[in-house]
Image (cartoon, coloured by chain):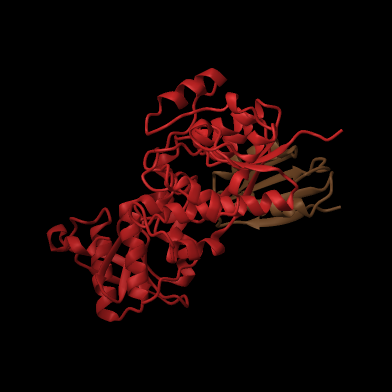
Chain colours: A red, B brown
């Protein structure tokens, strides 16, 4: 006798994917979760880096969802493959540099490949018609199904009744009557369904789960691409964009200034790859210099470093300058007055 | 038999979880694995990942700035 049908659910860590998986599990389907790590995920990183967030739970919400559901969760590293989605989105960008529709197509396609490799029958997402301005519209949701290759094996349990029946519904693997017809941006139906299942303390990330939707992050990524003359990036590049205060005082170099202890500790891991500065006469930030710098640049960076230290109002601050190869020297500088720092230096 | 060691230091979550997941995929039930990390988030994430996959955390200890997580691989028969 054949076992139950098997579905792979895209689990983001948000409420909708949690509910979608739960709705399908209720029909006796074996569900396992899949979660993709692009490098731009908000999940975990800022909590891990910034000490001031240390009182917040450091849980991974996708894993938390899997535990609530009692299912396995497979976390897949797609950092390298995802670059083409970010750099060349066929359908363009949504908010800021978010390749919204291409991202969804890419992830559903990856899930489809996983489904085939592991002998699963269909794919579940938590999408809701009309919830997002680009990837979750009535006219774009069929595009996701078509361009991902998932076609009618892609089930959106929260809004299935607003869409044509999928293969699992046609074959009787799922009872369409037990699926939902959610529509639009209201969260009330999801909140009610969460209460029905007894889910509490679920994540409700403001602004989504991807740094590419963030305006300030996108400005920094654009700056990186522009100054390099290329839209390429490595994981370390995009991780560093998440950390510290970024200033570009000159076109050929940028400063990454740790804002507190947790960020300074994170930046320490990059000391051997960057010229870096550290105030020694006063408490202050670790500062990485990204670019090729000359003597005048270093003096300018030292004065700015002093400005961001506890010695900002002192006559002079001693700043240690560390070269990439390990050479070290100190420089006494006058902290740069706040009003002398042009706003357009801040990224 | 000494435990296999996974070096996930200077990686932020979920990368230490992914490195653990990849290493476990090459293990047999009962194998011991030791994961070296620096991201404090691992003390929540790696145990959570182990719980949903049926692996057992045997120890979490702090050594200077490192976090060392020891685990015993569960019965992965039927593991997808």
Residue B21 seen anywhere in this rendered image of the structure: yes
In the image: residue A169, left or right of residue A232: right
In the image: residue A44, left or right of residue A171: left
- Residue in the foreground of this view, choosing between A253 and A108: A108
The quadrant in which the N terminus of chain A is found is: top right
Residue drawn at x 45%, y 35% as measured from the top left: A56
Residue drawn at x 69%, y 35% as measured from the top left: A171
Count how many numbered circles sit on residues in the image: 0
In the image: residue A279, left or right of residue A31: left
| Residue A129 falls in image quadrant | top left
Residue drawn at x 43%, y 34% as measured from the top left: A204
Task: Report the residue that reaches farthest toward the bottom.
Answer: A294
In the image: residue A124, left or right of residue A210: right
In the rendered image, residue A25, in percent from the top left (x then y), is placed at: 66, 29
Residue A278 seen anywhere in this rendered image of the structure: no
The quadrant in which the C terminus of chain A is found is: bottom left
In the rendered image, residue A95, in percent from the top left (x then y), is placed at: 34, 51
- Residue in the foreground of this view, choosing between A312 and A91: A91
- Residue in the foreground of this view, choosing between B25 and B41: B25
In the rendered image, residue B26, in percent from the top left (x then y), is placed at: 78, 55
In the rendered image, residue A269, in percent from the top left (x then y), is placed at: 49, 61
Residue drawn at x 41%, y 59% as measured from the top left: A91
Depicted B51 relative to depicted A249: above or below: above
| Residue A67 falls in image quadrant | top right
């Amino acid at each position: 006798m054949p076992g139950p049908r098997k579905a792979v659910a895209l689990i983001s860590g948000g409420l909708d994917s949690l509910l979608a998986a739960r709705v399908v599990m209720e029909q006796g389907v074996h569900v396992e979760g899949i979660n993709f790590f692009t490098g731009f995920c908000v999940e975990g990183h800022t909590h891990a880096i910034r000490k001031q967030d240390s009182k917040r739970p450091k849980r991974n919400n996708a894993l938390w969802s899997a535990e609530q559901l009692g299912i396995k969760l497979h976390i897949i590293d797609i950092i390298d493959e995802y670059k083409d989605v970010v750099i060349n989105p066929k359908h363009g960008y949504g908010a800021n540099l978010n390749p919204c529709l291409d991202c969804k197509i890419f992830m559903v396609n990856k899930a489809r490949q996983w489904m085939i490799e592991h002998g699963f029958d269909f794919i579940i997402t938590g999408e809701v018609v009309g919830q997002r301005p680009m990837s979750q519209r009535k006219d774009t949701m069929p595009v996701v199904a078509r361009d991902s290759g998932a076609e009618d094996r892609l089930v959106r349990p929260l809004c299935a009744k607003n869409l044509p029946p999928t293969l699992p519904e046609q074959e009787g693997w799922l009872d369409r009557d037990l699926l939902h017809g959610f529509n639009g941006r209201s969260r009330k139906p999801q909140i009610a369904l969460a209460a029905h299942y007894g889910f509490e303390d679920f994540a409700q990330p403001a602004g989504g789960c991807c740094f590419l939707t963030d305006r300030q992050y996108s400005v920094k990524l654009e700056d990186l691409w522009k100054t390099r003359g290329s839209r390429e990036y490595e994981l370390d590049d995009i991780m560093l964009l998440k950390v510290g205060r970024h200033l570009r005082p000159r076109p050929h170099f940028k400063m990454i200034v740790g804002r507190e202890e947790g960020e300074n500790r994170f930046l320490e891991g990059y000391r051997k790859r960057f010229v870096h500065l550290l105030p020694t006469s006063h408490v202050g930030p670790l500062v990485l210099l990204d670019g090729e710098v000359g003597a005048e640049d270093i003096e300018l960076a030292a004065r700015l470093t002093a400005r961001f230290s506890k010695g900002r109002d002192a006559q002079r601050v001693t700043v240690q300058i560390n070269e990439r190869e390990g050479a070290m020297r100190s420089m006494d500088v006058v902290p740069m007055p706040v009003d002398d720092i042009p706003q357009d230096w801040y990224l | 038999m000494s435990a296999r060691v996974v070096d996930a230091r200077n990686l932020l979550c979920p990368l230490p979880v992914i490195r653990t997941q990849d290493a476990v995929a090459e293990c047999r039930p009962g194998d011991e694995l030791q994961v070296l990390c620096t991201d404090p988030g691992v003390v929540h994430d790696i145990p959570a990942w182990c719980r949903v996959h049926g692996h057992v955390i045997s120890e979490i200890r702090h050594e200077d700035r490192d976090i060392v997580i020891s685990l015993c691989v569960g019965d992965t028969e039927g593991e997808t």
